[in-house]
Image: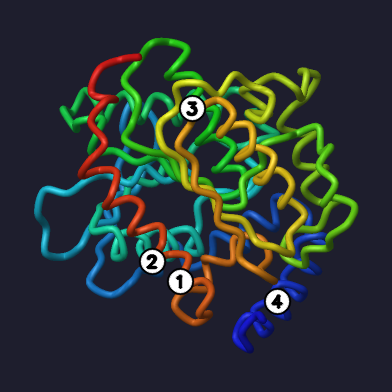
Amino acid sequence: MPSLQSRFARLFGQLLSTLVVHTPLPRLRALMAMNSDHPLLASNMTLKRSRVVGVPVEWIEPKTKSPQPVLLYLHGGGWALGLNNGYRWLASQICRASSTRALLVDYRLTPEYPFPTGLQDCLSVYRWLLQMEVPPRQIVIAGDSAGGNLTLARLLTLRDNGEFLPAAGICLSALTDLSCSGETYATLRDPLLPTQFIQDLIRLYVGNRDAHDQLLSPLYGDLRGLPPLLIQVGGNEILLSDSVRFAERARLADVAVTLEISEGMGHVWQVFTPLVPEAKQAVQSIGDFVQKHVETHKQHDTPS
């Protein structure tokens, strides 16, 4: 049974969704960017803004620095809402759990920059890391929601190009099917992600392209040769079927995939860590997964 704290989080989600649905996109971006000059981070973490290969990025690192693996984090927000304190908070919590430093990519947003611009920004930053001599086995790519979609699209692009693959990938409440054919779009109601809202954002991102393209909907791609994946999804969110179906197809393609479904949870519930027990547990699971694969996964040191 979901915890009492998670029920309060759900109520908060209902209030937030009312704001999201009824606020024009420019105003919504401005509201979500409030207090960005005062980053919300886990204790003993620091934030440094920079720009690499023309893309704004943010480093989140422990105050006591030492050589550490890199969590390359791609934020959600339907490809349209920018980097904000919610993502900084979540990424910093994952850093603590996984003993990593995080590099957050502030990729260009739709509708001003529809597909594939944001994906190209994310690819450029990953390639920059390799140029900086960060070993691929010391990089884990992660993302939530639209960022989970970008994570999978980036892995497919790297594999198809014969480039170095990271040690692993992590998807939190990821969009894997932009044709929205999953049954849970109709059978579940998620207060944190209204169906019509995400479908409107998908249309802005996809434009006149085929939504079944594997770089838009990784569910329909050839998944062979991808690195180990951790997929977390809430049992009460409309994207449940996106994650379940993707995990099934990944297993059929001999990908080492771990699917974790959190009962009663909604979209990207991990952001409520450590206040919600289910969120804290999910983040700890992410940390364990990262530590396991950056330490032991070696076969992606050479291009596939």
- Asked if the residue under mark 1 is in contact with the one under mark 3, i.e. CB atoms within 8 Å, the reply is no
- Asked if the residue under mark 3 is in contact with the one under mark 2, i.e. CB atoms within 8 Å, the reply is no
Residue drawn at 63 percent across, 89 percent down: 4
Position of residue 68 relative to residue 141, above or below, is: below
**The C terminus, quarter of image:** top left
In the displayed image of the protein, which residue is found farthest to the right? 186
x then y, percent, for residue 280: 45, 73
Say which residue label 3 marks.
Answer: 154
Q: Foreground mark, 2 or 4?
A: 2
Neighbor class of circle 3 (other Cα within 10 Å; few <14, some 14-19, many 20+) is: many
- Amino acid found under the numbered disc labelled 1: Gln
| 166 horizontally vs 106: left or right | left
User: In terms of sequence position, does the residue under pointer 3 or pointer 1 come before the other?
Assistant: 3
Residue drawn at 48 percent across, 27 percent down: 154
User: In terms of sequence position, does the residue under pointer 3 or pointer 4 come before the other?
Assistant: 4
Q: CA distance from mark 2 to mark 1?
A: 5 Å
Q: CA distance from mark 1 to mark 4?
A: 17 Å
Position of residue 201 relative to residue 303, above or below, is: below
- Asked if the residue under mark 1 is in contact with the one under mark 2, i.e. CB atoms within 8 Å, the reply is yes
- Amino acid found under the numbered disc labelled 3: Arg
Q: CA distance from mark 2 to mark 4?
A: 21 Å
Say which residue label 4 marks.
Answer: 10
User: In terms of sequence position, does the residue under pointer 1 or pointer 4 come before the other?
Assistant: 4
Is disc 3 placed on a helix, strand or loop? helix
